Image: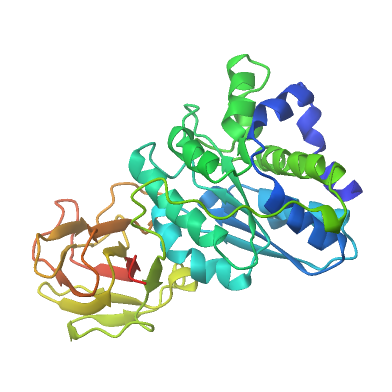
Amino acid sequence: MLAFVMAVAALVSGADDAAILEHAVVSLGDTARVQAALAKARRGEDVTIGVLGGSITQGASASKEENRYGNLVAQWWRETFPKARIEFVNAGIGATGSDIGTHRVGKHLLARHPDFVVVEYAVNDPNTPAAAETLEGVLRQILKQPNHPAVLLMFMMNNAGANAQEQHAPIGAHYGLPMLSFRDALWPEIQAGRLKWEDVEADIVHPNDRGHAYAARFVTNVLQQILKQLPPDAQLPAIAPLPAAKTANAFEDGAFFSAKTLTPLRNDGWEAFDDPGFGPFFGTAWKSAQPGSTLEFELDSRAVSVLFYRVKGATGIAEASVDGGTPVKMDAWFDQTWGGYTPMQLIARDLPAGKHRLTIKLLDEKNPGSSGHEFRVYAVMTAGGR
């Protein structure tokens, strides 16, 4: 594993490596699924490694693709099991949390049938009960796959040492998942002055190459521990059945639909739009700049959300409602200059089973900072309908 060792050599520079590795482990959990994935690779079979999360997982601030934590983890698998063919799926999208993740995990990750998955949403998710529920929606969809993929939770941090670990960890414990904390490992080192923030981070939240190497090392250290005690195939532990949900679990069975996968019942004034930035992730969007433009959809769902685009530009305000209920406004104006992103807006949840009508209308009003009305709907998202 020479290449992997060289890639993470900076880890031991000026820090107590053993203590950092120990503090990184929140819980090893039930390792039966991890053992199954390792045994599959040991047999020389095809194994797919996946990572799911926000911009950290996508690779922001890594100097090159191979220095991203997910790529480093995949490299460990390749070097540890040279007879196995290791596929790697990076399902990270910047500025997205588990609320969007639970709607896209099927298309972006599970369609590739991963055997081992790292889930990273602790920075982008708020530290609120809502984040616990949407994370559970993500996890249940992965864990109930017929090939029993292993899932490991990674808790990153921002420059205040904050994350959603308080909400995420009880969900991980409920499912017996291995859990690692970048925050628990490195924040004490930063507070004690043994590390500086800029030693491991490129900005207020994104790791630099050394930070990505730390995150990868935390994952592979746990994998190496489990591998050392991996029994023969005939003695591998049984996979525990999926427990009942811990939260209200309104977001299991999430899905998202774009302009090419969902036909409106009504389309007055909206046109299909292929965005070179977010299009590769979400597909063809709907776009309009004419107030009064209306979209209507019929959906079989118990929770309905809209994924739209927010940016500092000539953007407008739209409202959405389900079955004529109280409309929810969505303001596409964004006061920051670093670029645009795609927030999710929940329109309705806990709907009765059956078909419902979603209406989206572009309003005449706009943010005072905006000079126009353009609004882009990237996806209509549903959950709980199946």
Picture quadrant where residue 342 is located: bottom left
Q: State the scheme by which the image is colored.
A: rainbow
Q: Nearer the viewer, residue 226 or 309?
A: 226
Q: Is residue 229 visible?
A: yes
Q: How many marks?
A: 0
Instruction: Judge whether 371 appears above or below 335 on screen.
Output: below
Look at the image and tell me in which quarter the C terminus lies: bottom left
- Residue under the image location 38 percent in, 57 percent down: 341
User: Where in the figure is residue 189, as x and y percent of width and height?
Assistant: 64, 20
* Quarter location, residue 214: top right
Residue 59 point in image, percent of width and height: 60, 52
Q: Residue 326: x and y, percent? A: 9, 59
Residue at 68 percent across and 62 percent down: it is 115
Q: Is 124 located above or below residue 318 in the figure?
A: above
Residue drawn at x 87%, y 49% as measured from the top left: 3
* Side (left or right) of 76 relative to 370: right
Does residue 63 appear in this view? no
Rendered position, 158 above or below 136: above
- The residue nearer to you, when weighing 38 against 285, is 38
Q: Is residue 283 left or right of residue 22?
A: left
In percent of width and height, residue 331 lies at 21, 56
